[in-house]
Amino acid sequence: MTSILVLNGPNLNLLGSRQPEVYGATTLADIEKMCADWADANGCTISFAQSNHEGALIDHIHAARGVSDGIVLNAGAYTHTSVALMDAIASVDLPAIELHLSNVHAREDFRHVSYIAKVSIGIICGFGARGYIMALDAMQAHVKD
Ligand code: DQA
């Protein structure tokens, strides 16, 4: 059975109340439930985590080695800054999908830079909470290929 880590970075614990005009009204708990329901319906297991701390996110990525078949990563603002997260993904030899709720390319220039994209099989952005399901679907298909 395919196992996928869904990992969320800084400030995503505040989804639902954080800039809803940008990120929507769905909470992270709602998204976790959507992902769990999708996993049940699609013969997949997921683990779901969030941290505001770069080192803790790296620990989650390392812990996925030998446990998960792929990583869906919404690294939040660390996407645009973190060489350490990029190195962590490159180090574990697992496929990763970069995910964002918002369309980062329609926003400020600094959000157009991604360290995570360099080590990802693909990127999904701009579809809000639905993007999580799109990413899980894409990861499951990739792992089965
Ligand atoms: C985000 C986009 C990032 O630029 C931002 O820093 C976030 C959320 C998104 O899901 O749209 O924290 O990753």
Image: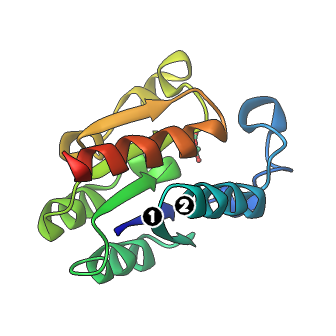
- At label 1, counting other C-alpha atoms closer than 10 Å, the crowd grade (few under 14, some 14-19, many 20 or more) is some
Q: Are marks 2 and 1 in contact (CB under 8 Å)?
A: yes
Q: Secondary structure at mark 2?
A: helix
Q: Residue 123: percent from the left, percent from the top?
A: 36, 34
Quadrant of picture, ligand 1: top right
Label 2 amino acid? Ala
* Residue drawn at point x = 48 percent, y = 63 percent: 7
Viewer-proximal residue among 133 and 7: 133
Q: Residue 145: percent from the left, percent from the top?
A: 18, 45
Q: Quadrant of residue 83?
A: bottom left
**Residue beneath label 2, please?**
39
Looking at the rendered structure, the number of numbered marks drawn on it comes to 2
Q: Is residue 114 left or right of residue 38?
A: left
- Which of the marked residues, 2 or 1, is nearer the chain's N terminus? 2
Q: Is residue 92 left or right of residue 136?
A: left
Q: Secondary structure at mark 1?
A: strand
* Residue drawn at point x = 86 percent, y = 50 percent: 17
**Residue beneath label 1, please?**
44
